[in-house]
Image (cartoon, rainbow, N blue to C red):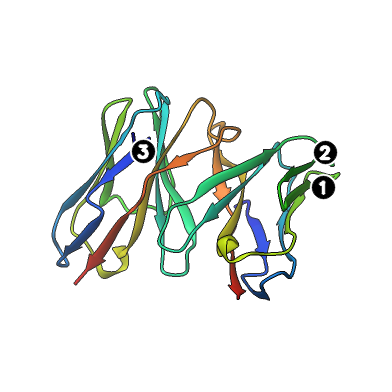
Amino acid sequence: GQQVMQIPQYQHVQEGEDFTTYCNSSTTLSNIQWYKQRPGGHPVFLIQLVKSGEVKKQKRLTFQFGEAKKNSSLHITATQTTDVGTYFCAGPAYSGAGSYQLTFGKGTKLSVIP
Amino acid sequence: DTAVSQTPKYLVTQMGNDKSIKCEQNLGHDTMYWYKQDSKKFLKIMFSYNNKELIINETVPNRFSPKSPDKAHLNLHINSLELGDSAVYFCASSQGGISNQPQHFGDGTRLSIL
C-alpha cells in the first residue's frame, strides 16, 4: 500500500546545531501533517501543509511542502534540549472503498547533546 | 480538562486474557481512532470510527474490536491476548474527514503481556 517514507530514523546533534528530517511519498499528497512525540509522551500535532511549495515557520521550526506535493521537510535551527523527541510526518493514504487513512512515517528520533 | 483521555495508563496481564481499554474525548469531534505503537515507535492505525462508518485496517487481527457507545467514546476490546500485542495503544480524535484534520491523541495505554 501507499507509504510515507521518512529519513533519517535517528539523528544526534550537538545543542545549537541544525536538524532536518525528510518525508517522501510515492504519490501526490493532498496535505501533510507533522507531529512531535516527546519521550514517554503522545504525538502532538505541530502543523499541516496543504499548498504546493508551501513554507511555514513556527519560531525555530521551518516546514516545507514540495512543489509536486510528494515530499516535505522539517528543519530546526539551533536545536535546544527541549527539541528532543520523535518527529513524525503523516499523510492521507487510500485505504479502499473510497476511504483515506492518515499514514505516519516511521519518525525521526532526535537526540540533542547539551 | 484533558481533551482525549484513556484508561488505564498501564495494563499488565497474562497471555490468553481478555482486556479492554477505554477512551473518551471532550472535544466534540465526530471521528475517533485507535493506533498501535510498537517498540520501534512505528505508529500504525488500527481503526477509525465515526457514527456512520467503521474503517478497519486489514492487518488488525479480529481479536481486536472497537466498541463505541456514543460519539465521545471509543473503547478497544482485545480477546486472547498474545505476546505480540505488547505495545502502546493510543486513542485519538479529529473533526470531520480523516485525512485533512489534525488528530488529538490521548496519553496512551502501555500494554505488557506476560
Q: CA distance from mark 3 to mark 1?
A: 32 Å
Q: Residue at x 68, y 76 (%)?
A: A14
Residue A69 location in percent, x, y?
A: 78, 44
Q: Quadrant of residue B112?
A: bottom left
Along the line of sight, the residue nearer the viewer: A54 or A30: A54
Tell me the element at label 3.
strand
Tell me the element at label 1.
loop
Name the mark on residue B4.
3
Residue A90 location in percent, x, y?
A: 60, 48
* Tag nearer the camera, 2 or 3: 3
Which chain letter matches label 2?
A
Say whether mark 3 and mark 2 are on the same chain: no
Amino acid carrying label 3: it is: Val
Amino acid carrying label 2: it is: Ser
Q: Which residue is mark 1?
A: A66
Q: Which residue is mark 2?
A: A52
In this view, A90 is above or below B68: below
| CB-based contact (under 8 Å), mark 2 and mark 3 | no
